[in-house]
């Protein structure tokens, strides 16, 4: 009987003293190929057109968001619509250093700015200073069902 108590006590001591990862193998994970994924340094939520979205992934030409109010995924496109009483010439002084960004007039007094997300965010900050301009990001709600199920 004493021998069994000694064995049980020895096993218990070994379990308490033995390091947790002594027998496990460490596997190094390969880095993911998803560009600009969310990390701890970036805000988990963004406000686009006055609505709060969860930011899932960032790409240079679009962002993937999640609308928690209607439980649906959203693509934030690299398009910013600017409307108001201004001309293309006045865009030039506010949008300096953005020669890669395109400005197209889509209606009288309404312009579509297209570029990378970083360029458009910088342009948005500059254009917010102009009185009388309305800015609206273009978003596209993703379908709830795959195309085969519709």
Image: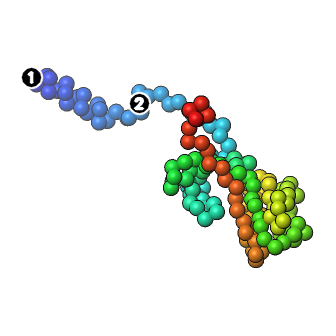
> How many marks are shown on the rendered structure?
2
**Residue 70 placement, left or right of 7:** right
In what quadrant of the picture does the N terminus appear?
top left
- Vertical arrangement, residue 145 with respect to residue 63, above or below: above
- Vertical arrangement, residue 150 with respect to residue 105, above or below: above
Tell me where residue 142 appears, x and y as whole percent: 61, 44
In three-dimensional space, the C-alpha distance between marks 2 and 1, rounded to whole angstroms, equals 31 Å
Color theme of the render = rainbow
Is residue 135 visible in the rendered structure shown here? yes
Neighbour tally class for label 2: few under 14, some 14-19, many 20 plus, Cα within 10 Å = few
In what quadrant of the picture does the C terminus appear?
top right
- Vertical arrangement, residue 10 with respect to residue 45, above or below: above
Which residue in the rendered view is the most extreme toward the right? Answer: 89
Point 29% across, 31% down: residue: 14
Q: Which of the two residues, 77 or 126, is positioned nearer the viewer here?
A: 77
Q: Which residue is mark 2?
A: 22
Residue 55: mark: none
Q: Which of the two residues, 6 or 88, is positioned nearer the viewer here?
A: 88
Q: Which of the two residues, 77 or 19, is positioned nearer the viewer here?
A: 77
- Identify the secondary structure beneath mark 2: loop
Chain-order first, disc 2 or disc 1: 1
Tell me where residue 106 appears, x and y as whole percent: 82, 58
Tell me where residue 145 appears, x and y as whole percent: 56, 38
Point 61% across, 65% down: residue: 50
Tell me where residue 48 appears, x and y as whole percent: 63, 60
Point 23% across, 28% down: residue: 10
- Identify the secondary structure beneath mark 1: loop
Which residue in the rendered view is the most extreme toward the left? Answer: 1
Figure quadrant of residue 147? top right
Q: Which residue is mark 1?
A: 1
**Residue 83 placement, left or right of 4:** right
Point 85% across, 58% down: residue: 104
């Amino acid at each position: 009987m004493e021998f069994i108590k000694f064995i049980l006590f020895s096993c218990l001591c070994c379990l308490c003293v033995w390091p947790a990862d002594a027998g496990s193998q460490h596997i190094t994970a390969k880095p993911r190929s998803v560009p600009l994924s969310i990390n701890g340094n970036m805000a988990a939520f963004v406000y686009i057109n006055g609505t709060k979205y969860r930011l899932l992934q960032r790409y240079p030409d679009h962002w993937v968001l999640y609308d928690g109010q209607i439980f649906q995924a959203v693509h934030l496109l690299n398009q910013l619509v600017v409307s108001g009483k201004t001309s293309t010439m006045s865009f030039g002084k506010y949008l300096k250093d953005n020669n890669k960004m395109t400005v197209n007039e889509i209606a009288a007094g309404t312009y579509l700015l297209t570029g990378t997300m970083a360029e458009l965010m910088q342009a948005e900050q500059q254009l917010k200073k102009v009185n009388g301009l309305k800015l609206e990001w273009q978003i596209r709600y993703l379908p709830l069902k795959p195309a085969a199920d519709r």
